[in-house]
Amino acid sequence: MTYETLLYEINDHILTLTLHRPDNMNAFTVQMANELIDAFGRASEDDDIRAIVVTGSGKAFCAGMDLSADGNVFGLDESIKPSLQDLEERFEDPDIITGVRDTGGRVTLAIYECKKPVIAAINGAAVGIGATMTCAMDIRLASEKARIGFVFNKIGIVPEACSSFFLPAIVGVSQALEWSYTGEILSAEAAKEGRFVKAVVPADDLLEEAYKIARKIAEHSPVAIALTRQMMYRNSVKDHPVEAHKIDSLAMYYTSITSGKEGVSSFLEKRTPQFEDKSSTDMPPFYPWWTE
């Protein structure tokens, strides 16, 4: 796919994915959603990519949904009148995908499924989907100029992009509800105080700070990183720790006989490990365990 709303640049095993509609404050569109879904799926299977940094062109990260579109501005088909049963039984039906399923949620599910760690470098306004899409990213850094808002209730709609799953896990239910109820635009410092972002940094240093983290990740086994990402998200919502123990046990077993051997050898020999495993072809046989 050729991207019209994104920049896709790889350097030193790091993909910089830039939301690129600077004249519109990188406002979100259905086209951008489809391009992001493609980009995360592509990056997930590209062995040259070991970490992803997401940012915005110009002064904004993403100013939310582009509300200037004709018809239903969220790209939904108002003639369908769907039920929960429709979503359960026809989840992958093209009419449901394009006419009913939330576009932001389709993006965050693509991020969730991705094998590569994702770092948000929030350089400016991140409002609506601009805020909620980052909830599915693993680490969030904010420029001192960033402003973040979960503004859905202000315009008579609800939080989307699976944020009712991700946001309470990040900041707690009470804080997630307060931010959603009020629709308050948060400063970068307020977002940090609420534990939504890891750090607030000067605008000129934002990408470099993100790359510092990405470079550390890129040094490690791609298979171990991919497993860790899915284990943290999926095991943390299980009803009993024994479910995590089952997956931990299989993951430990298979990594101990592959990349773990290089890791142990390099530690004993006091040298930098040289991991040659690939997340595209070398995932252990029980992966993806959640589809069984």
Image: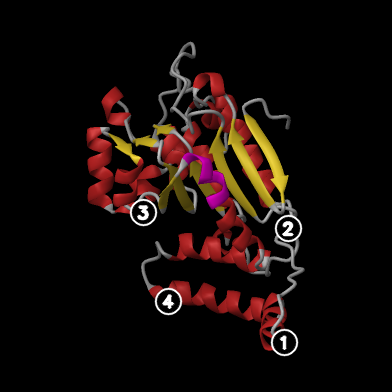
Q: Which residue is mark 3?
A: 170
Q: Which residue is mark 2?
A: 280
Disc 2 residue type (three-letter): Ser
Depth order, front residue of 12/158? 12
Q: Earlier in the sequence, mark 3 or mark 1?
A: 3
Q: Quadrant location of the N terminus?
A: top right
Q: Earlier in the sequence, mark 4 or mark 2?
A: 4
Disc 4 residue type (three-letter): Val
* Span colored in magenta: 203-209
Query: Is residue 22 visible to the viewer in this orientation of the structure?
Result: yes
Mark number, residue 242: 4
- Label 3 vs label 4, nearer the camera: 3
Residue contact between numbered discs 3 and 1, judged by CB atoms under 8 Å:
no
Mark number, residue 269: 1
Mark 1 vs mark 2, CA separation in Å:
29 Å
- Label 4 vs label 2, nearer the camera: 2
Q: Earlier in the sequence, mark 3 or mark 2?
A: 3
On screen, 276 above or below 211?
below
